[in-house]
Image (tube, rainbow, N blue to C red):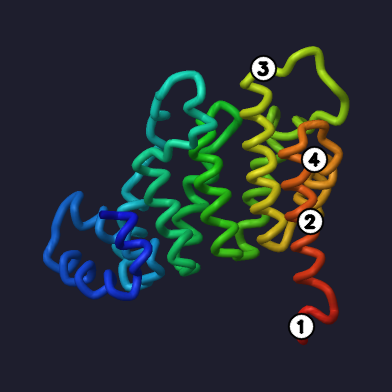
């Protein structure tokens, strides 16, 4: 049903709004998340209120060794992602509050949810917080520019976290050019997926800031 609603957004919004207006409790939050994902900003205050009631990040969803790479968002992650999808900057302070609680020990899904949401919101107010995250011990320096003996999954997890946050920082105006610096490092990463992704992000950013971009 969710896939159908997402692929027929124009037809789904009105009945979803009606259902949301009548709902209460968890169902109301879930409907608000779907509406926000469809770009409906009328539910943003509801989701902000729900996120502001969160005192700490929730536990990682375990699904075997590849759980981090499957990217299974937790309930709190889902709130953050929905607010990002709505692209309403009223959500920025609530997201930044929880982003300030992250560190190298937090599960990858939390970092990726914050990075994705803040990138979509594109607010320069997020840049200092993202810079601060990447400046924490163990949060950066994970690009592999020479062939290692045999990387463990933990190394890939750290790299996924770093490049996700660097990309978000780059799209939020960058702070002290840290986002670009990290992406440049990953452009030389021996792992093709990381290198190609970093190159694509930097290239897209260059096109966006090109003097002729406004008339193209």
SS state under label 3: loop
Query: Image check: 11 left or right of 93?
Result: left
| Whether residue 196 is situated above or below residue 72 in the rendered picture | below
Give the distance between the C-alpha atoms of the residues marked 3 and 1, in whole angstroms: 44 Å
- Which of the two discs, 3 and 2, labels the residue nearer the N terminus? 3
Q: Earlier in the sequence, mark 3 or mark 4?
A: 3
Element type at mark 1: loop
Identify the residue position indicated by label 3 in the image: 152
Which residue is the site of mark 4?
Answer: 186
Q: Residue at x 54, y 34 (%)?
A: 108
Tell whether label 1 touches label 3 (CB within 8 Å): no
Looking at the image, is mark 3 or mark 1 earlier in the sequence?
3
Across and down, in percent, residue 117 comes to: 52, 55
Q: Earlier in the sequence, mark 1 or mark 2?
A: 2
Spatial CA span between label 3 and label 4: 18 Å
Binning the other alpha carbons within 10 Å of mark 3 as few (below 14), some (14 to 19) or many (20 upward) gives: few
Q: Position of residue 68 (x, y in %)?
A: 52, 30
**162 displayed left or right of 67:** right
Q: Earlier in the sequence, mark 4 or mark 2?
A: 4
Rendered residue at 43%/51% (across/down) = 80
- The residue nearer to you, when weighing 189 against 169, is 189
Q: Which residue is mark 1?
A: 216
Q: Tell me if label 3 and label 2 are in contact, CB under 8 Å.
A: no
Q: Nearer the viewer, residue 212 or 23?
A: 212
Q: Secondary structure at mark 2?
A: helix
Q: Which residue is mark 2?
A: 202
- Marks 1/4 in contact by CB < 8 Å: the verdict is no
User: Mark 1 or mark 4: which comes first in sequence?
Assistant: 4
């Amino acid at each position: 049903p969710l896939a159908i609603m997402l692929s027929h957004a124009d037809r789904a919004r009105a009945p979803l709004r009606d259902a949301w207006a009548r709902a209460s409790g968890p169902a109301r939050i879930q409907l608000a998340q779907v509406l926000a994902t469809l770009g409906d900003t009328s539910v943003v205050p509801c989701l902000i209120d729900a996120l502001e009631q969160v005192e700490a990040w929730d536990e990682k969803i375990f699904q075997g060794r590849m759980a981090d790479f499957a990217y299974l968002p937790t309930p709190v992650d889902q709130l953050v992602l929905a607010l990002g999808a709505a692209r309403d900057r009223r959500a920025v302070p609530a997201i930044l509050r929880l982003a300030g609680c992250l560190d190298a020990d937090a599960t990858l899904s939390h970092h990726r949810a914050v990075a994705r949401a803040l990138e979509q919101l594109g607010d320069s107010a997020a840049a200092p917080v993202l810079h601060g995250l990447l400046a924490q011990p163990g949060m950066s320096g994970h690009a592999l520019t020479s062939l290692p003996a045999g990387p463990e999954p933990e190394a890939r997890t750290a790299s996924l976290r770093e490049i996700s946050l660097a990309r978000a920082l780059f799209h939020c105006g960058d702070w002290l050019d840290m986002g670009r610096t990290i992406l440049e490092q990953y452009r030389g990463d021996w792992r093709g997926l990381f290198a190609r992704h970093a190159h694509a992000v930097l290239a897209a950013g260059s096109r966006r800031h090109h003097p002729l971009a406004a008339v193209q």
